[in-house]
Amino acid sequence: MKHTITAALAGVIAQGAISQCAWAEPGRAPALVKVRNPVEAASDPAETGFRVFVEALRPDATARGVSRAIFDAAFRDVATPDAEVLARTRRQGEFARPVWEYLVGAVSPGRITRGRAQGARLAATLASIEAQTGVPRAIVLAFWGIESDFGASAGTVSTIRALATLAQARFRGNLFREELLAALTILERGDITPARMKGSWAGAMGQVQFLPSSFLAHAVDFDGDGHRDIWNSDADALASIAGYLKNLGWNPGLSWGYEVVLPADFDLTRYRADLADFARRSVHRTDGAALPVSGEASVFLPGGIGGPAFLITGNFEVVRAYNTSDAYALAVGHLADRLAGGPALAAAWPSKAARLDTDGLRALQTGLAARGLYAGDADGRAGPKLRDAVRQYQIGQGIPADGYATPALLARVKGGP
Ligand code: CA
C-alpha cells in the first residue's frame, strides 16, 4: 500500500510530519526533512514518525557523550519500528504460566546435558570466576543456560531498533528511552558495533540478556581484550553474570535454597527463620544432605501444601532481581543443582486447576490491599510481597499459612468479613 499512496494523502501526512517535528524540536528546522524528498519521506508515515523520534533523541545522546558519528551509525540501518517487537508487548511470559510448566521447559534433560558439557569445557574459566566473585559456577552456568541456552540463543533482533520501537511507543513510560540512550553509550565506548549489538525483542542483549543499563553497571571484560563482549566471548558472558549476582548481594556462604520435606505438624505461621531453627523443627532436605547451620531462609510452597516445598535464602531474591518471577528464580536454582549433579525434584506438583491466573492474582492483590495486608502494585504477579500478604490473611483466618494463591482463597477474600 505504501507505494500506491495518493498525492493528496501524502500531503496530509507530510503536514502531520512537520507538526510532529515542530513538537519534537521547537524552533528548529527538522534536519530529517532537509535530507529527504518530503513526499518520499511521507510515503510511509510509520517511517517518518520514527525518524522524527530518532532526531529528537539526538540532544540527550550528545549530552551523554555520544558522538554524531556513533549516533548516525547506530541508526543507519534502523529506518522503521519493529512490528514484531510491538506485538510481543501484548503477550505474557513466565507470569502467565504455572511454575511447573515453566520448569519443564527451562530445566529440560537436553539443557542439563548441554550445561554439563559446557561446564566441563569452561571449567578453568568458571573456577577462576568463582574464586573472584564467590558466585558458584553452577549458578553462573544455570543463569547462562536459562538466558540464552548457553549462548546458543542470544537473540537476533537489533537492540537499537527494538529499544527505539519500545521507546517511541512509550511502552513502560520512559524506561526504554533511557535504555536506548544507555545502548548508545555502549556503542560509543566501543564494546560492540551497531550491527553486532543484538538480542531479544525487549532489548535484552547477548548471551546474558542484559538490558543496556545492566550492561553499563555489571558487564565485565574477563578475557582482557579491552571489550566487554557479552555477545561473542564466553568468558565475558560468564564473568558478567557472576559480576551481576555479586553486585546485587549474592551471599557466597549459602545456596539459593533447598527442596525439603516439612513434618506433618510443621507450624506454617513460623515460615521465616534461621536454617538451624528449621533443622531443629525436623525439616529435612530431600537429597539427604544436612541443612547449613547458619543463614536465614523462608518456606516457599510454589504449588501450595502437598506440592514441592523449599527453603529459600536471600540468594533466591538476588536471582529474582534479574527477572522478577518466582518461576524464573526457581528454574535457575534448580538447574544449577542439576548441573552440579543433584537429583530431580522429589515431590510431585499439584493439579493445574488450583492456581490463579494473572487477573485472579490482581483481584487478590486488590482484595488484600483493601484489608490493609498488601501494599504493592496490583500487577497480577506472585512474589514475596503477595506471599507474605496471603500468609498474614491465612494466619488471621486460622487456615494453613502456605502463602499460595488459589481460587478458593480469592473467593474467601472477596466474600468474607
Ligand atoms: Ca573481552
Image (tube, helix red, strand yellow):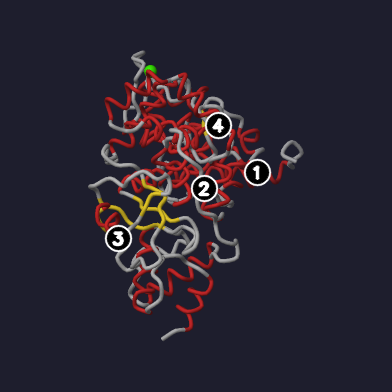
In the image, 167 versus 9, the foreground residue is 167
Any part of residue 117 in sight? yes
Q: Residue drawn at (60%, 61%), measured in percent from left and top?
A: 352
Which mark's residue is nearer the viewer, 1 or 3? 3
Judge from the rendering whether residue 299 lies leftward or rightward of residue 405; answer left or right.
left
Q: Quadrant of the N terminus?
A: top right
Residue holding disc 3: 281
In the image, 394 versus 53, the foreground residue is 394
Q: CA distance from mark 1 to mark 4?
A: 39 Å
The kind of residue tagged 4 is: Gly
Q: Residue furthest left?
A: 294
Image coordinates for residue 108, horizontal then vertical, percent: 57, 39
Q: CA distance from mark 2 to mark 3?
A: 53 Å
Circle nearer the N terminus (1, 4): 1
Asked if residue 26 is positioned above or below residue 232 in the image, the reply reads below
Which quadrant of the figure has residue 251? Answer: top left
Q: Which mark is residue 35?
A: none
Image coordinates for residue 37, horizontal then vertical, percent: 61, 30
Q: Quadrant of the C terminus?
A: bottom left
Circle nearer the N terminus (4, 3): 4
Asked if residue 259 is positioned above or below residue 202 in the image, the reply reads below
Which mark's residue is nearer the viewer, 2 or 4? 4
The kind of residue tagged 1 is: Gly
Image coordinates for residue 211, horizontal then vertical, percent: 42, 37
Disc 2 residue: CB within 8 Å of ligand 1: no
Disc 4 residue: CB within 8 Å of ligand 1: no
Circle nearer the N terminus (2, 3): 2
Q: CA distance from mark 2 to mark 1?
A: 24 Å
Residue holding disc 1: 11
Image coordinates for residue 42, horizontal then vertical, percent: 63, 38
The kind of residue tagged 2 is: Ala
Q: Residue drawn at (45%, 65%), measured in percent from left and top?
A: 404
